[in-house]
Every structure is written in structure tokens, then in C-alpha cells.
Amino acid sequence: MTIKLIASDMDGTFLANEDQYDQKRFAKLLKELKERDVRFVAASGRRIQNLRELFAPMGNQGLLDQIDYVGSNGSVVQTSDEELYAVYLTAKQIEKVIEWNSLNPQSADNLIVLSGTKGTYVSNHASQAVIDQLARFYPNVMQVEKLLSIDDQILGVSFIWPHDEVQKYVTAIEEVLGHEIHVTGSGFGSVDILPKGVNKANALAILQKHYGISDDEVMVFGDNSNDLEMLKKYQESFLMPNAAAFMHQVHDREALATNEEAGVIKTIEEKLNLSQK
């Protein structure tokens, strides 16, 4: 098996609780991947700025040039040193999804998050605890009075619901607006509204074209519905054992351990016959 690019979701997949990962073990793995000319891609619903911060410690090992980034569930694609792709929602699309939310009786208390190039925007009723939690995933969180008056390019809109209700709302929004936007769940109760055609598989295709990598040279890891497109596309695709039950119904090949047990690293080590720990 020849693998040239490995892409992993972050939350619930590569990262353990509190954004932790075994930095020493990963640096060792990344060094061996570099020797084999294998790229590692952080593919997440998080903003790329946040992803770069997560992997900044790899700079101490001179390994940052081996990491590429798919942010905002595929809205932005960057190599270690350049942006290859970025796409944004139109003002009309943002207006439509916010209007849909306002007309949904069950949406009265949900949180709306707009992810832009300059910052992350939430309504001014959000509590400080909520803002602090969002800051884990989004940079420069700001409260605004009118979400539709923001002067920024918006990569995506997220609605936050109880975790077990996410798929219900993904389906509901798709039925109304799916012809012009892409809707996906990305964990922690988030329903993400993205430009049409945006997903992690299409984003990885941009990196593949950039590096000249074929589909059978790609390995991917994920745990949620925002990973479905890439899990379905690539033969070497692994679902985390800790994924929700509905994901196990659509994908049956699992990583060797959970995210809390460094399952991504462990699976890469074994499948590529790399030294462990």
C-alpha cells in the first residue's frame, strides 16, 4: 500500500478531550511520514487559524512544512505556506438560513455563529461561558447586535442544538435550502451551513491536484457526518470507534482505537508499518 496523503478530522477523531494529543509521539510519526514524502492534513470544521495553533508545537521539530489544512469543513484549503482555495456564503444565502432559523419554533434559544475571515460573530445575548467555549474552535469571537449587518466574508453559519438533535435539523434545513447550500453536522451540537459543493472530500481533491496524488494514495479518518464524503470516497478510510451510532450504520471500517487512545496515530503506525511510541 502506497499512501502519500493522510487526512484526519480533529474533534472526536485526532484530538482527545481538551484539545490534547500526544505531541512527542505525533512528532515522531510526522518525521517518519516526511521521510516517506507523506503529507498530513488537518481537516476540520474549525478555522485554519485554530488548526495552525494546535500544531504550532511541531515547529520546534521543524515539521510544520509537512502539515496542510482543510478548515471550515472544506471552505478553505491551505498548504503549510499558501492558500489554495477559499469560498464564501453570499449575503442572500446567509439571510435565508437566518430567516429559516427565526421561523422555526424550536430555534428560539439556539445559538447562531457566523465564521468570517476577520472574526467569529455571535448575537449579543450569548453568555461569557458560551463565548469562552467557542474560542476553543473559532478565533476572535465577537458579539454583534445584528448578524446580517456584519462587514466580512462569511465562510459558514453554524446553529448550535442539543447534540442528539443535530441530524434532525440537518435533514430539515436540507429539505428547504439544500438546492443552494450544503448542510452538515460537525459535532458538539453544531449544524453547519456551507456554500454548495463544499465538503472535506472536495477540499482534499484540491490538495491532491496540487501535489499530484491519486485517490488510492489517500488515507482518511473521521467520526461525524461532516466526514461522510471523504469516508465514502477513499478506500483507505477509517471511522473512529467512538463515533455516533448512525455513523457506524453507514461506514463499517474502524480505526484501531478511540480518539482518547490516540487511535489515528496508532492506526497510521500499524497500516504503514512505522515504529510505534
Image (cartoon, helix red, strand yellow):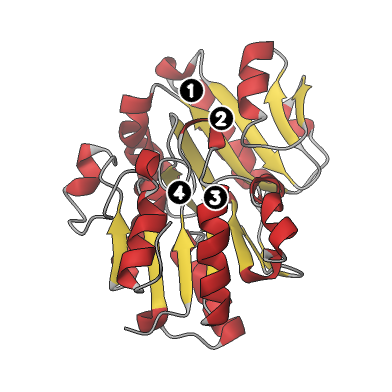
Q: Label 1: which residue?
A: 103
Image quadrant holding the C terminus, namely: bottom left
Image coordinates for residue 215, horizontal then vertical, percent: 39, 81
**Identity, as a three-letter code, of the amino acid under mark 2:** Glu
Asked if residue 59 lies left or right of residue 43, the reply is right
Tag in front: 3 or 4: 4
Q: Label 3: which residue?
A: 194
144 or 79: nearer the viewer: 79
Tell me the CA gap for discs 3 and 4: 23 Å
Image coordinates for residue 171, horizontal then vertical, percent: 32, 40
82 or 267: nearer the viewer: 267
Tag in front: 1 or 3: 3
Asked if residue 225 lies left or right of residue 22, the reply is left
Residue at image point 36% right, 42% down: 261
Tell me the CA gap for discs 1 and 4: 37 Å
At mark 1, the secondary structure is: helix
